[in-house]
Image (cartoon, rainbow, N blue to C red):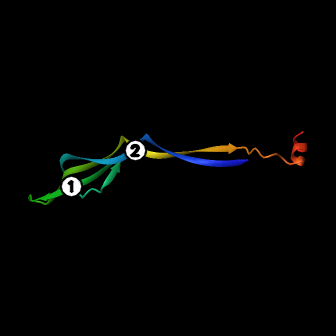
Amino acid sequence: MQVSVRTKTQNHHIEIPCIAEEIRLERIKIGREIVEVPQIRTEGNVTIIPVVKEIAVVVKRLILQEEVHLTKISVENKTVETVQLRSERAEITRSQTPQPERERERED
């Protein structure tokens, strides 16, 4: 008996989800007088960066000029890629040679 294995390679088109993160920048005008510089903070998936300026008045005051809100957004795109998939097939060929006497007795 002879066993041989053959490998076959085929190209298949598969759809793969691609997830990327994007940053959306939004400037929020505040214009409010503050006592000290606010810390950078995070609210959910939004990072808030305070932007301040000093203005000269009779007394120096801190004004919260604006906040920059950065929002993380997940974007999923589908793309088609070509990949190779392999499959194997075993082929069995029986020989026509006579079996020895012992093997015939075992089969009975």
Expressed as whole percent of the image width and height from the top left, the position of residue 4 reads 64, 49
Determine whether, in the image, residue 101 is placed left or right of residue 22: right
Which quadrant of the structure image shows residue 98? top right
Depth check, front residue: 73 or 95: 95
Expressed as whole percent of the image width and height from the top left, the position of residue 79 reads 37, 42
Mark number, residue 81 = 2
Residue at (56%, 48%) from the top-left corner? Answer: 7
Cα separation, mark 2 vs mark 1, equals 45 Å
Q: Earlier in the sequence, mark 2 or mark 1?
A: 1
Residue at (38%, 45%) from the top-left corner? Answer: 19
Mark number, residue 21 = none
In which quadrant will I find the C terminus?
A: top right
- How many numbered discs? 2
Front disc: 2 or 1: 2
Asked if one can make out residue 45 in the rendered structure from this viewpoint, the answer is no
Residue at (23%, 50%) from the top-left corner? Answer: 67
Q: Amino acid at mark 2?
A: Glu
Q: Amino acid at mark 1?
A: Val
Mark 1: which secondary structure? strand
Q: Can you identify the residue that label 1 sits on?
A: 51
